[in-house]
Image: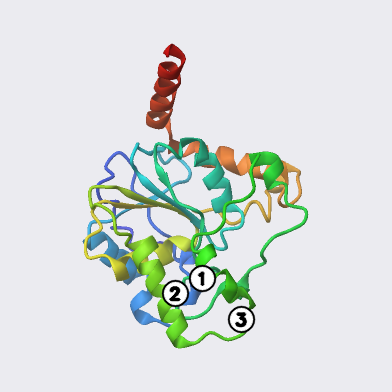
Amino acid sequence: MLVQSTHVFANATEHKTRVIHSNEKDEGLKHNKNASLNLVLSEYMAKGGTIIRLDKDALPFALLPGDMVFPSCSGANNRSQTLWNTLRPFADLINLMPPHATRYGFDPYNDRANWHRTTHGHSDDEFISWAGVPKSPKFGWAEFQNFLSMKEVSTKELKMIKNYYDTHYYHPNISPEIRRVYITFAQNAHIHLYRLNQTNADLKNVVVLFFPLEDLIHNPLSIWHTRPRSFKSYDKLSNILKSYLDLSQLKIIEISAIEQQNCK
């Protein structure tokens, strides 16, 4: 079943129309009738936001110098870390944010503590072998990692944490001229739309890109013939991501900078 197939992607005429499927709604929001996928999508579009589904024959989305880019996935352990490292060579040209754990992180998007719903760290992880660097700390990790050991969290503490993500992630204090590009996966798109609606009156310069991909690092495709968290699984997923992201404008500037440096 498709959700509101009449919703096209504002400000994205070069892309074919895509929609969010009903099975991509987040179950953590089902208790809130105002957070239904239909309503959230309608409000997001009415505020001028752009949402683009990256799969099948979708055209690659062009990232531009100066973009503020927010990688995310459910736990910020695998998919968004792969995306973060894929974009890391261009971190001087875009404002690349640390990976955000949308569903299983510190942001109480559903007014609950969600960070105990995921496993943090695996001894068999080959990310460093593939990337050459450790995984990035998650967005908000330095501020809230101490909450991992807490069995109970007060309503006041949840409100404080939510306000941090309101003002630092979903509505950062930056010029409205800077384009914000949130890149996420599967059900996490629903949460992004919901939280962006909560924190922004105008979304005309905001883009949500989402890949309808489950965690292919934790559960690699059988045709890859590899185990979870392997070098090969990271490499395969990175290649999928790169096939839908047009990095040409970033590469041109990067090459030009190298040539200028060589001429000195």
Circle 1 crowding by C-alpha within 10 Å: few under 14, some 14–19, many from 20 = many
Q: Are marks 2 and 1 in contact (CB under 8 Å)?
A: yes
Seen as rendered, the residue at the extreme front is 264
Number of numbered discs visible in the structure rendering:
3
Q: Quadrant of the C terminus?
A: top left
Local secondary structure at mark 3: loop
Q: Would you place residue 16 above or below residue 140 in this image? A: above
Name which quarter of the figure residue 44 lies in. Answer: bottom left
Q: Nearer the viewer, mark 1 or mark 3?
A: 3
* Residue 161, numbered circle: 2
Q: Would you place residue 229 above or below residue 102 in this image? A: above
Badge 1 amino acid = Phe
**Position in image of residue 72 (x %, y %):** 49, 56
- In depth, the one of 2 and 27 nearer the eye is 27
Q: Are marks 1 and 3 in contact (CB under 8 Å)?
A: no
- In depth, the one of 225 and 202 nearer the eye is 202
- In depth, the one of 99 and 259 nearer the eye is 259
Mark 2–mark 1 distance (CA, rounded to whole Å): 7 Å
**Position in image of residue 78 (x %, y %):** 61, 54
At a point 43% along the width and 37% down the height, the residue shown is 92
Name which quarter of the figure residue 48 lies in. Answer: bottom left
Mark 2–mark 3 distance (CA, rounded to whole Å): 14 Å
**Position in image of residue 94 (x %, y %):** 39, 41
Local secondary structure at mark 2: helix
**Residue that mark 1 sits on:** 106
Q: Quadrant of the N terminus?
A: bottom left
At a point 64% along the width and 40% down the height, the residue shown is 131
Q: Are marks 2 and 3 in contact (CB under 8 Å)?
A: no
Badge 3 amino acid = Met
Circle 3 crowding by C-alpha within 10 Å: few under 14, some 14–19, many from 20 = few
* Residue 150, numbered circle: 3
